[in-house]
Amino acid sequence: MKKRARGPLFEVRHSAIHGYGVFALRRIRKGTTVTEYLGERVSHAEADARYEDKDPNDNHTFLFTVDARTVIDGGVDGNEARFINHGCDPNCESTTLDKRIFVEAIRTIQPGEELAYDYQIERDPEDPPNVDEIFACRCGAAKCRGSMLVARKAPRKAPRKKTARSGRTGKAKRRGAGR
Ligand SMILES: C[S@@+](CC[C@H](N)C(=O)[O-])C[C@H]1O[C@@H](n2cnc3c(N)ncnc32)[C@H](O)[C@@H]1O
Ligand SMILES: [Zn+2]
């Protein structure tokens, strides 16, 4: 019996969320690795230098943080993965394996559905007061938290004893497509 030729899993087209998005062309089963986030691998310093002239109110980026050393710039030698938008109730998640970033379906996705994962962009003590406005989310999910940034932490109760806490060193990086 002749095997049916299977076309591509997804396509890039205009999205109601933002700009271009990635849409399933076939049913994608839960657990499927949909794509890898490709692009030039650079240091945080290089990523910062590349986009330092960007308007601080412009949240658009193709940078994806891999770890404390490496950022993937999907704007250089990137693939379709750079067009996957953020969603607050997403059908995909990004996973790291051997310092590579993969996008995996976390539920079965039907043809026509837009692929999304939660960017979970870190907050920074130096964020401007309107940071949630700048990173406003337009995913349209009933559970939309209104922001592509991680949810604000509930205020901590005062510690009973004064103890040293390990703090973050250095300036947290603002990357649009990663943690
Ligand atoms: C990796 S790109 C995704 C592709 C993008 N739609 C495009 O056409 O270039 C990430 C950028 O898309 C925009 N974006 C993605 N998801 C969004 C969302 N849920 N709400 C608002 N903007 C979003 C933001 O500007 C973000 O920095
Ligand atoms: Zn949302």
Image: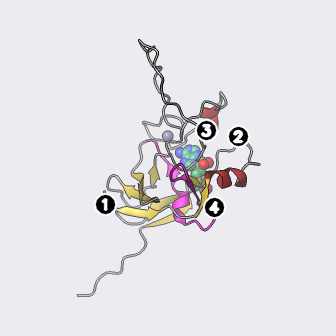
Residue 69: percent from the left, percent from the top? 55, 52
* Disc 2 residue crowd, few under 14, some 14–19, many 20+, Cα 10 Å: few
Residue under the image location 34 percent in, 63 percent down: 27
Q: Nearer the viewer, mark 1 or mark 3?
A: 3
Residue under the image location 73 percent in, 48 percent down: 52
Left or right of 103 on screen, residue 14: right
Label of residue 170 in the image = 3
Q: Counting residues from the N terminus, which is met first, the one under dot 2 or under dot 4? A: 2
- Circle 1 residue: 29
Q: Are marks 3 and 4 in contact (CB under 8 Å)?
A: no
- Circle 2 residue: 57
Question: Which range of residues does the magenta coloring cover?
Answer: 65-88
Calculate the distance from the C-alpha at mark 4 to the C-alpha at mark 1.
28 Å
Is ligand 1 less than 8 Å from the beta carbon at label 3?
no
Residue 6: percent from the left, percent from the top? 36, 76
Q: Is residue 17 visible?
A: no
Is ligand 1 less than 8 Å from the beta carbon at label 4?
no
